[in-house]
Structures are given as C-alpha cells and as structure tokens.
Image: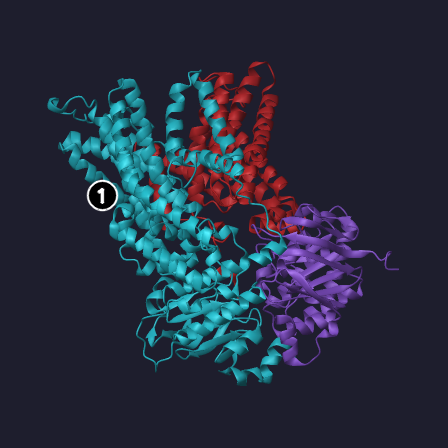
Chain colours: A red, B purple, C cyan
C-alpha cells in the first residue's frame, strides 16, 4: 500500500512537471503546446547522445535541458507567435504546435535512429526505505524536484515583480502592454520555462525509459491528462493533477490488474470532466476571456 | 515663444481605425507642456479610440504623433508606455488578481531598476491618495469603485509619463468620489503634469482643463476655452452631447 | 442603385439562379463519370481514393461544426471509430445486414454526438475542444483494452458485396458506395451553406447575443448541428470498416487533429477546402516516395508553414491571388470618400418598413418593469427598485449618465440578464423568467450599443437573421435546401424582405456589401433594419445614434416617427438629449441605478433634477 503511494508519487512527479510546463505556457499565452511531450524527448535524446561521446553525465544532462528550453523559445517565435498575431482567438496554434511535435519527433528519429538507446545512469541504484516501502534515489529526486519546481513557480509568481507581471499578462494582456511589458518576450520566456520543465522531467525519467524518439507521445498525453484532472488555469493545480494521475496509475496496476493503468485514469478524467468541467483546482475566472464574442453583460453599464 | 514651447503631445492629421473605414479622420491637436486638455463629444465619436491610438493600441493609418518631442507613431504599445504616455483606461482595468501595491508597482515597470525613484513615486501616490496607502496590501477587487479609480490613476502616475491619458475617470462613481478624482486631477496639473482627459461630466472637465476639443464623428469639430460651457444647464448638455 | 448597376445585379442573380438549377444534374453526371473511372482502376488506386474519400467525409463534417459554427471538435476520430467498430461488431457478432447498419450508424453516432454536445457545451471555446479530445482518448482506450474489439490487433471489417454478375461492368461496388456517401455529405453541407440557416450559424459563431436576440436558441442549434456532424462521422466510420482491418491505431487522437489540419489546410468554411485538405493529407504519404521519416518531417513542417504563412488555407490564398488583379481593393477609404458614401436621407423609404401584425391589447402597457433589482454576481447593486412603464405606441426615452444602469435595464428587458427581484411584463405577459431567445416571440426586438453582426456576411444576410423565427422548419430543410422549391421560394422572400427593410432605413446602396466593408453608421442602421424586419411590437434601441453623422441621425428620426405611426412601442437609450426630447413622448431618467424621474418629455426637460444628474451639482 505504502509502496503504491511512493511509486505513484514518483511517477506523478514526472507527469506533474510536464503538466506544469503545459500550464505555465497556457497561463501566459492561452495556448496548449502540443509539442510539450516532444520537448521532454529532446532533452532525453540530447543527454543520451552526448553522454555516449564521453561527456560527463551532468554536462550532457545540462546540454539536454538547454536544448529543450531553447527549442521551447524558438517554437514560440516560429510557430505560435505569428499565428496568434494573425488571430488571437482562432485555434490555429493547435495545428502549428502539433506540426512542431511531428517535426521534433521525426527529426530526432532521423538524427538518432528510431530505436531505443541507453540513457546514462544519473544516481546509483541505492534505495531509501520509507516505512515499509522504498524508493530509489532517482525516484526520490523526482519527487523532490517536482515539489521544488512548483514551490519555486509559486514563489516567483507571488513574490517577484516578474511573477506579478506574469499574472497581469494572464489577466489582461493588452493592459499589461499599456504599462510597458513586452508580452511577446514574456510569452517566449514562458515557453522556455515550459521546455525546461519538460526537459527536467525527461532527464529524471530517462534512466527508466531509455532514450527513444517516441517518448514524447506517452509523456505528452500523460501530462495532458494530469492537466485535465488538475485544471488548466492554475499551474499548481496541474502539478497536483500530476501526482493524482501517478497515484491512479500505480493504484490501478496494483489493485485492479497490471494493465489497468492504461484505462483507469481515463475513467477518472471523464468523471472529473462531468463533475467539474474545468478541472479540480480551477477557479473558472480566467478562461472566460477566451470567449470570442463579448456578451452584452461583459460590456458593463453605460 | 510659440516656436520654443515644447508640446507634451502633438497629433498631426492622424487617421486610425480597425476596418476598412477610419474611425479617426485627420485629427490634429496638441497639449502644451503642463496643460490639461479635455476631449468632449457624443458616444461613438472616437474619443476612446483616439486615446488608444496615442498608446499604439489601434493601428495608425496616416499622420503622426509626437509625445514631448519623441516620435511615437508606430511604436509598439509597450515602448510608448515606457515614460512617454500612460493611460487610465475606461473601466479602470486594474489587474484584478493582484494587490493594490502590486498594481502600482507594475505601473513603474520600466523604472524597476531605479528603486529610489520608484519609492519616491509610490510615496507621491500615497500622499495624493492616503486611502490607497491604507489599503496597499488588499486585493484591488476589495476596494470600492472610487478607490479603484484612485489606484488606476496612481498606476498611471507610477510610470512618471510625459503625458497622462484618462478615459472617463468619473464613470460609474458616486458624486463624492467624483469630486475626489477631480481634486486629484487638479493636483496632478499643479505638479506640472500634462493631461488629456476624455470626460462626460462637463463640470469635471471645466474644473480641471485649460482647453476643450469637441470630437464628433471621428473628427475635431471645435476647439475652445473651458468657458464655452456656462453654468446654464440645458445649453451645456446640448453643447457637447450633440 | 443606378440603372446599370441594377441591370448588372439582376443579370447576376438570374445567372446564379440558372447555375443553381444546373448544379444538381452537373454534379450527378460528374459523380457517375468520375466514380466509374475510379471503380475500374487498379485496386491500389482504389484503396488510395477510398481512404481519401472517407477522410473527405470526415473533413467536410468537421468543417460544418468548426468552420460554420466555430466549434473546434477534436472528437471526430472517436465518432469515426464508433461508426467503424459498431459496423464491424454488429455485422460479425449479431449478423446485422451492412445496409441496415448505415442508418444505425447515422442515428446512433448522431445521438452520441448530441449527448457529447450537451455535456461539452456547459463550457465553451477551448473546453469544448478539450472535452471532445478526451472523448477521443477514451474511445481509443476502450478500443485497445476491451476484448470484444480485438485489442490493439483490431478486427477484420465486413466484406462489402460486389455488384451482381448481371449488372457487371461498373467495377467495384464499394467505390460507388463510398463516393455516394461523400457526395451526400458534401451535398448536405453545401446545401446548409446555401440555406437560410447559414447566416444564423455564422451569427452563433461570431455574434451570439445578436443570434439570441433574434430568437435563436443558440445552445440547442449548436447541439443539433454537432449531432448532424457526428452522424456524418459515423457514416465515414461505416464506410471505413469495409476497407480492411479496424484497429485502434487508425482512430487515435492524432487522427482528430489530422482532420482539423485537413480543414484548415484546405480552407475553413469552404466547399472545396476540406476536400482538398483531405486529398492532400491522405495521398501525400503515398505519392511522395522518400524515406518515411523524412516524409513525416516534411509533413509536420507543412503544418507549421501553412498555418504561419497561409492561415486562411490553400483556398484562401488562391482566392487572394485571383482577386488581386480584379482590383477588389481593401485599402482604407479616405475621409471624404466615407462622407460621400454615408447614408443618403433622400433614399429613405421608411413607409416601407415592415410593421407588426401581432394583436396587442391597447390598454395594457407595452413594457412594464416593476421593482427591478439587479447586481452582477456578488457585486454592488446596479439597479435598485426601478420601475418603468411604456405605453403602447409611444417612444420612451431612457437617459442618464454613463454607468447609471441604462444598458443593464435594457439587457434585463431583452432577456440577456435576469433580474434578482422584480417583474418584467410585455403586453401584460410576464417574461422575466424567459431567456433572450424567447423575446421575439413576445414581440420584442432590440439593437446593441456596439453592433454585433457577422462581419463576413452581406448586410442583407445579416438582416435576414431577423427573420429566423418566421422561416418555417429552417433547420430541418437546411440539409436539402437548394432542391426544395418551397425553401428556394422562402429564400427569395427572405431576401426581398431583408432588402426592403434595408431600403426602408435608407441603405439600398449597401445591401450587397459585406458588413466588414461598411462604415460604422451603416452597421448601426443594419442592426436597426434587422430589428425591424421581424415585425416587432416593441423595439428596444441601445444608443442607436452612437457614431452616426447628422444625415444619418435625421434618417433614424424619420424611421422612429414611421414606427410610431405604425403603432410600435420604442424604448431608446441615447445621450443626445436634444434628440430624445424632440422624439420621445415620455422620458425616464436613471442615475446610479435609481430612478430619478419619469414622465412626459416636456416636463422632464425642465426638471432641475435632470440638470443636476448631468452637471453633478
């Protein structure tokens, strides 16, 4: 039982990091980046490839993180920004981010081959005993990093001018520009942070999954499902969604059967969407702005 | 004298709009340094569009805008906002998820490295609106309409702009709150600020402004001193309502 | 309109009408010829064309909801899968005839679509896309994890029977069948695009309050349109099951996105766009013989490039290229030109205005609000105990400073908001519990402070939305509109009525112009014409003069006089007090959410309290 909880949290941390990336990019730009999973994959592949050239593992991993963050920024300026400039309310970004996902995935397969390759061990295989259960150091690191990431995000959001600017942009981008903030730059930064978080998740999960160009699909979808459970409007909720999804995965495998993690989380997602269509931790405030037409109510009185 | 007077705002034959037709048609006006100018006219005449065009929030088609000698035509909004012009928009548009103080600090975004200047500005806002200081840690949504308007004016002041733009600051406020806004605007003038004010309340405009432009159907149709509008009721209403 | 212009327009209409009659036979002949050719080609080519045709059905069905109604569904792969699996399983396990299964798929998947729509439309915009996306994921999980569906391996689909030997020579029967399905789908969507429902759907997409104000129950229409689209996707699934194996990989969420890409790539809300997109995306991987990875890479790059450089799709780019030499300029119009183009009061023929035929009790007030209290959410009180009585056949002015609650009161009367307390009666019948779409049925029409119209449609089509309620069976007939003589007659009648209403407000010149291309004043008057065309007994106008030129204001005054003579009651919010006091019988003054005074215009005009309200003394 405790073991299920622990492994659930460990894998949940990875899902949560991906979901947090989704949510941060969405928070600033109102765009769901369908290439989020592929950014994770890029970090994994770069790390794996560089470590075979004899680079120290930590340096290879660092290069992987830089790669995924840089690609996040690049994809905003190439594939998302121009689309939003044309029509902020269309869903064209859905197509362009998916296009980027395909390009990254097949690009990786072309460069490094479509099959799995070894990923360098990050930590030794020592385990930490927690009560009756145990975690590998790698798993423990995952949980800690995930918690640090969400705590760091919340600290930045609440206590720095930059974080408050992010909240201002999220609430009213036009007015944020009118007080002098370069919202395009901020959006680029948000995509970079999203890429970085995906990369961190990748480096943490790499030793378990090995390096494979098609990793992005699996973890992209998992992160998205976590996002649906937690709600898209609050990045911290997305992380919570990740942990919940991890627990559901492990719990289903343990208590139902060994393949139940394939379908059980979806039952939960459907239930969440039926009961709380905006996710468990959403306020519902922010998304109203997405509506294309202003209703007469929104025009106020005059 | 005339040639050496630096204008806080110079608009030269500006046309601007969204669709195929211009909302603003060849507007020319100026605001002298330290002057307060009111922009009156019926709803739909393009007053808000003009303020937004100055901020670069509406595509400028032809003509030009200079703020304190700096050409701001076609400058992106966030660069206009960095010390050239600042706007109190219609309906205030405070950042609803932030506190009063955060809203004010964001107004001084481009000055963030100059901490001394920011704290001096913050103090001058608090001096003008003591109630804002009292509520500095509260979320803006917890404030009354009049108090929110003060925060919005404070946010504008925090950028220390060459030109202050205010869009109907009296909208939806109780009489007492309107008087406070009027006092605050008079004080801003007294400190040497240059104001362009869109206002529906003739009395408020009269109280604060040196000159009045009348905007009708996207064009300037009249320019006069503040006393065009006497205290005689009906004439006043008709004079600027159409 | 000049005689030559009129002549040209008449000729254009006539040729369009002839073309309209020719379309059906021409298309049928083309179908037979093309299908015949394909049905006799190699089985390799056939399978290629069949896959493209199935995706064509899907793309066209998605375009119906995404392009016309603005609902970006990512559930189409799931609906597609339902059709395919239902056909395969019911045929294999229960031995149902495949031709019985076609209507089963249409109705069954259509109903699933309706339920999915009902659940998803609780939330709008992006959440609709998300909910339908999750639907596709769930269907995918079910397909791969249930034993009955054969898991990841999938199931062999049923065999489609060949033509009997006696009528040989036609080639493969399946090709004829799938082509017929595609033809029916394209025909139905094409027909909707030519029906009286089309402007209504676009209004739901772009101007929802305007649609609701004209009696459109927008949520219901959205759900039903989504149901129709789902039925088409079900049909695509039915057809797809005959092409070989049915397995989960063919219905993954990427398929949903691919279908959307087909629509956007080809051009949204066009007849040919989705077909071009579907053909390109289905055939591209087969015809471009390069390394499959490189091919996939190029594929993804194309997504990005098209969206970034040609956001209106292939057809959008083509249209632009074709139009440019023709000289349809989109350059801004100069001030002088705009003045010259404004509404001509001399063209005003307000005597032609349609007037209401409803029988109303002349003794009851046309509108009666009593004890209205209202606040937005938990905010402060916007209206506090407001009473308003409008006598039938009078013009009632509503004035007060900005922020006094006038627009809120009007939105309550028109049903866009509901009062927290108090009652609203129209001709004596309580309506405060009904929503906006029910108002036209009680004789009320309205205009909005800022015109909300469908910008890509002509002024005339926008006005025609005002006739939604009076067009019988508009939804049901939309699927086969152009072939129904009755529907065609209705279309002509609608066009005539809408045109007459525009003439009546002095806008003959702008009848055929897209709203996106008209000056502001014309938009305002188009709204007015749309509000009048439904023959209301009560007309509510929210700042109808905002942004109008002097000539246009004169035109509005003439229209109001005419409406009053016809017995229509009018409530008008306006800041131009001179206009108000000249036009209105009675005037009500609001300030800060409370009633200041109400009474005959002459009395209110000299009331000192009114001056106070405006001067703030």
Residue B146, horizontal then vertical, whole percent:
63, 68
The subunit letter for the residue under badge 1 reads C
Q: Residue at x 47, y 50 (%)?
A: C514
Say which residue appears at 53% left-offset and 84% top-offset.
C602
Quarter assignment of residue B161:
bottom right
Q: Residues within 10 Å of mark 1 (few under 14, many from 20)?
A: some
Q: Position of residue C226 (x, y in %)?
A: 32, 46
B230, B144: nearer the viewer: B230
Q: Quadrant of residue B242?
A: bottom right
Left or right of residue C469: residue C89: left
Residue tagged by mark 1?
A: C107
**Does B206 sit above or below residue C247?**
below
Q: Is residue C145 visible?
A: no
Camera-side residue: A67 or A160?
A: A67
Choose between B121 and B74: the one closer to the eye. B74
Looking at the image, the residue that sits furthest to the left is C166
Q: Is residue A124 visible?
A: yes
- Give coordinates of residue B225: x percent, y percent: 76, 70
Q: Against C518, is C131 above or below?
A: above
Residue extending furthest top? A53
How many numbered marks, from 0 up?
A: 1
Q: Residue drawn at (49%, 47%), measured in percent from left and top? A: A233
Query: Disc 1 on helix, strand or loop?
Result: helix
The vertical placement of C32 against B51, above or below, is above
Q: Does residue C496 appear left or right of residue C397 in this picture?
A: left
């Amino acid at each position: 039982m405790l073991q299920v909880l622990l492994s659930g949290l460990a894998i949940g941390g990875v899902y949560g990091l991906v979901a947090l990336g989704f949510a941060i990019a969405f928070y600033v730009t109102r765009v769901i980046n369908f290439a989020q999973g592929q950014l994770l994959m890029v970090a994994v592949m770069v790390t794996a490839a560089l470590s075979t050239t004899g680079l120290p593992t930590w340096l290879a991993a660092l290069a992987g993180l830089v790669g995924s963050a840089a690609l996040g920024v690049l994809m905003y300026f190439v594939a998302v920004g121009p689309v939003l400039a044309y029509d902020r309310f269309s869903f064209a970004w859905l197509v362009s981010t998916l296009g980027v996902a395909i390009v990254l995935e097949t690009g990786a397969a072309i460069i490094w081959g479509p099959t799995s390759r070894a990923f360098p061990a990050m930590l030794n295989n020592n385990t930490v005993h927690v009560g009756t259960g145990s975690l590998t150091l790698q798993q423990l690191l995952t949980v800690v990093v995930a918690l640090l990431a969400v705590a760091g995000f919340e600290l930045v959001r609440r206590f720095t001018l930059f974080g408050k600017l992010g909240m201002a942009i999220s609430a009213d981008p036009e007015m944020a520009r009118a007080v002098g903030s370069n919202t395009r730059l901020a959006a680029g930064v948000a995509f970079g942070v999203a890429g970085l978080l995906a990369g961190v998740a990748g480096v943490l999960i790499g030793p378990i999954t090995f390096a494979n160009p098609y990793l992005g699909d699996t973890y992209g979808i998992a992160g998205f499902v976590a996002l649906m459970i937690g709600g898209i409007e609050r990045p911290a909720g997305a992380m919570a969604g990740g942990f919940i999804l991890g627990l559901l995965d492990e719990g289903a495998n343990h208590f139902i059967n060994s393949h139940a993690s394939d379908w059980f989380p979806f039952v939960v997602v459907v239930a969440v969407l039926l009961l709380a269509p905006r996710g468990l931790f959403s306020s519902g405030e922010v998304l109203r702005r997405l509506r294309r037409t202003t209703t007469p109510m929104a025009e106020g009185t005059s | 004298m005339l040639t050496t007077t630096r204008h806080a705002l110079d608009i030269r034959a500006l046309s601007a709009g969204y669709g195929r037709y211009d909302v603003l048609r060849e507007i020319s006006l100026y605001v002298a340094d330290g002057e307060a100018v009111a922009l009156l006219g019926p709803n739909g005449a393009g007053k808000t569009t003009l303020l937004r065009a100055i901020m670069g929030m509406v595509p400028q088609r032809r003509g030009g805008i200079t703020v304190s000698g700096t050409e701001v035509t076609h400058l992106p909004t966030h660069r206009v906002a960095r010390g050239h012009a600042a706007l109190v928009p219609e309906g205030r548009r405070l950042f609803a998820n932030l506190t009063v103080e955060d809203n004010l600090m964001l107004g001084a975004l481009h000055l963030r490295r100059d901490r001394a200047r920011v704290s001096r500005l913050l103090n001058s806002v608090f001096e003008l609106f003591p109630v804002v200081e009292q509520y500095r840690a509260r979320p803006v949504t917890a404030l009354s309409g009049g108090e929110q308007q003060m925060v919005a004016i404070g946010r504008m002041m925090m950028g220390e702009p060459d030109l202050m733009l205010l869009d109907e600051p009296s909208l939806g406020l109780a009489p007492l709150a309107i008087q406070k806004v009027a006092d605050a605007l008079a004080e801003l003038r007294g400190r040497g600020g240059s104001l362009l004010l869109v206002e529906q309340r003739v009395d408020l405009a009269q109280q604060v402004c040196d000159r009045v432009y009348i905007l009708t159907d996207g064009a300037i149709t009249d320019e006069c001193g503040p006393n065009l509008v006497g205290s005689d009721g009906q004439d006043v209403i008709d004079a600027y309502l159409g | 309109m000049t005689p030559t212009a009129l002549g040209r327009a008449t000729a254009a209409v006539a040729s369009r009408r002839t073309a309209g009659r020719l379309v059906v036979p021409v298309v049928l002949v083309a179908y037979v010829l093309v299908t015949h050719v394909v049905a006799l080609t190699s089985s390799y080519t056939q399978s290629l064309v069949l896959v493209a045709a199935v995706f064509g059905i899907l793309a066209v069905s998605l375009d119906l909801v995404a392009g016309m109604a603005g609902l970006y569904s990512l559930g189409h792969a799931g609906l597609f899968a339902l059709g395919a699996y239902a056909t395969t399983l019911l045929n294999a396990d229960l031995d149902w005839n495949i031709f019985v299964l076609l209507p089963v798929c249409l109705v069954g998947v259509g109903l699933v679509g309706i339920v999915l729509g009902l659940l998803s439309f609780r939330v709008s915009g992006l959440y609709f896309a998300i909910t339908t996306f999750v639907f596709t994921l769930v269907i995918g999980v079910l397909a791969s994890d249930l034993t009955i569906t054969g898991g990841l391996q999938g199931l062999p689909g049923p065999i489609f029977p060949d033509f009997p030997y006696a009528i040989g020579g036609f080639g493969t029967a399946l090709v004829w069948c799938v082509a017929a399905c595609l033809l029916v789908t394209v025909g139905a969507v094409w027909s909707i695009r030519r029906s009286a429902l089309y402007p209504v759907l676009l209004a739901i997409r772009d101007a929802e309050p305007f649609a609701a104000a004209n009696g459109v129950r927008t949520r219901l229409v959205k759900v039903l349109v989504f149901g129709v689209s789902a039925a088409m996707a079900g049909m695509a699934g039915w057809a797809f099951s005959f092409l070989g194996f049915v397995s989960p990989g063919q219905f993954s969420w990427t398929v949903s996105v691919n279908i959307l890409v087909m629509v956007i790539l080809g051009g949204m809300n066009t007849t040919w766009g989705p077909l071009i997109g579907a053909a390109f995306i289905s055939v591209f991987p087969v015809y471009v013989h390069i390394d499959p990875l490189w091919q996939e890479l190029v594929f993804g790059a194309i997504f990005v490039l098209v969206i970034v450089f040609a956001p209106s799709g292939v057809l959008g780019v083509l249209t632009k290229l074709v139009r440019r030499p023709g000289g349809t300029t989109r350059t801004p119009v100069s001030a002088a030109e705009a003045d010259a183009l404004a509404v001509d009061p001399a063209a005003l023929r307000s005597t032609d205005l349609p007037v209401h035929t409803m029988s109303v009790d002349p003794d009851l007030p046309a509108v009666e609000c009593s004890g209205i209290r209202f606040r937005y959410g938990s905010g402060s009180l916007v209206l506090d105990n407001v009473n308003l009585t409008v006598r039938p056949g009078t013009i009632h002015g509503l004035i007060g400073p900005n922020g006094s609650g006038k627009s809120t009161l009007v939105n309550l009367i028109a049903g866009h908001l509901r009062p927290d307390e108090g009652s609203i009666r129209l001709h004596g019948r309580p309506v405060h519990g009904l929503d906006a779409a029910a108002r036209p049925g009680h004789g009320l029409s309205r205009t909005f402070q800022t015109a909300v119209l469908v910008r890509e449609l002509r002024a005339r089509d926008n006005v025609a939305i005002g006739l939604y309620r009076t067009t019988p069976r508009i939804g049901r007939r939309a699927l086969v509109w152009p072939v129904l003589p009755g529907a065609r007659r209705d279309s002509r009648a609608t066009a005539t009525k809408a045109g007459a209403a525009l003439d009546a407000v002095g806008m003959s010149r702008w009848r055929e112009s897209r709203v996106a291309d008209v000056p502001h004043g014309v938009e305002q008057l188009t709204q007015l014409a749309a509000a009048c065309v439904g023959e209301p007994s009560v007309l509510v106008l929210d700042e109808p003069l905002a942004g109008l030129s002097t000539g246009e204001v004169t035109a509005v005054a003439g229209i109001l006089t005419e409406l009053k003579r016809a017995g229509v009651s009018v409530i008008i919010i306006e800041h131009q007090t001179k206009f108000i006091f000249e036009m209105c019988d009675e005037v009500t003054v609001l300030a800060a959410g409370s009633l200041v005074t109400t009474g005959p215009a002459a009395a209110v005009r000299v009331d000192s309290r009114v001056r106070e309200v405006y001067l703030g003394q």
